[in-house]
Image: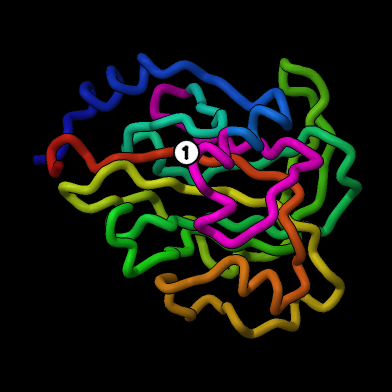
């Protein structure tokens, strides 16, 4: 059964808009969720990554690390920003799900939900102070794919990472618009393409739709 629009709007109305404010809190949330261990990455952020989802209500939701959202709040595509001294770019943003098809049996992980190069900063104010909007100048290599955890699964982690983009990144062919999105490995990809360690990140949890769980 497809949820009615009124159900969607009511469920979204109860969500508080939030965002990350502390590098140490984001790192602690990543460590508590075993993300560095499961992705085989070093995560010592030097900036805050803002990930914001537009909503049918006209409002928006900015993630705080570890927040759980209903699937209908994650249609996206999200917009991105950064707080911190990160320079002008370019940057690469990646989103992965290490829990597919289930956290207990992640045989299809990682699923690549987004991979976009050539992001540059654009200064603006967001009500919380200075933030650098991250705006891409070329199409994504993998366009944003909405979370779709299967019925019966526990909530999945959807992890957003920001990398400095090396000079020759646009010449890489490990991932193109036609590359399968399953069985991805963000740490191996970062090593092969010279991305290094992420400079910022955040994540959300999304469970299956109540109508399919």
**Quick check: 18 left or right of 200?**
left
**Quick check: 147 left or right of 79?**
left
Q: Circle 1 sits in a helix, a strand or a loop, which is it?
A: strand
Q: In which quarter of the image is residue 183?
A: bottom left
Q: Is residue 84 above or below residue 98?
A: above
Q: Estimate how packed mark 1 is, as few (under 14), some (14 to 19) or many (20 or more) residues with alpha carbons within 10 Å.
A: some
Q: In which quarter of the image is residue 197?
A: bottom right
Image quarter (top left, top right, bottom left or bottom right) of the C terminus: top left
Q: Which residue is drawn at 47% across and 58% down?
A: 113
**Quick check: 126 left or right of 181?**
right
Q: Which residue is drawn at 78% across and 33% down?
A: 83
Q: In which quarter of the image is residue 123?
A: top right
Asked whether residue 54 is drawn in magenta, I would say yes
Q: In this view, does 18 lie above or below 200?
A: above
Between residue 93 and residue 43, name the one nearer to us. 43
Residue holding disc 1: 204
Q: Residue at x 71, y 30 (%)?
A: 24
**Quick check: 63 left or right of 127?**
left
Asked whether residue 176 is drawn in magenta, I would say no
Q: Residue 81, position in %: x, y? A: 71, 39
Q: Give the range drawn in magenta.
A: 29-58
Q: In this view, does 64 lie above or below 44?
A: above
Q: Residue 87, position in %: x, y? A: 91, 47
């Amino acid at each position: 059964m497809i949820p009615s629009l009124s159900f969607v709007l009511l469920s979204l109305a109860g969500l508080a808009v939030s965002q990350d404010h502390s590098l140490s809190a984001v790192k602690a949330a990543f460590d508590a969720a075993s993300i560095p261990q499961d992705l085989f990455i070093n995560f010592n952020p030097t900036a805050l990554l803002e990930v914001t989802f537009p909503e049918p209500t006209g409002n928006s939701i900015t993630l705080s690390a570890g927040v759980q959202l209903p699937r209908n709040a994650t249609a996206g595509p999200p917009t991105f920003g950064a707080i911190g001294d990160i320079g002008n770019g370019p940057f690469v943003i990646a989103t992965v799900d290490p829990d597919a098809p289930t956290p207990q049996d992640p045989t299809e992980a990682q699923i690549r939900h987004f991979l976009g190069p050539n992001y540059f900063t654009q200064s603006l104010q967001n009500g919380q102070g200075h933030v650098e909007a991250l705006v891409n100048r070329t199409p994504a290599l993998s366009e944003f794919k909405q979370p779709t955890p299967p019925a019966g699964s526990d909530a999945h982690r959807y992890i957003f990472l920001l990398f400095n983009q090396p000079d020759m990144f646009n010449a890489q062919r490990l991932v193109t618009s036609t590359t399968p999105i399953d069985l991805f490995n963000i740490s191996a990809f970062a090593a092969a393409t010279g991305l290094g360690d992420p400079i910022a990140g955040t994540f959300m949890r999304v469970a299956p739709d109540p109508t399919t769980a």
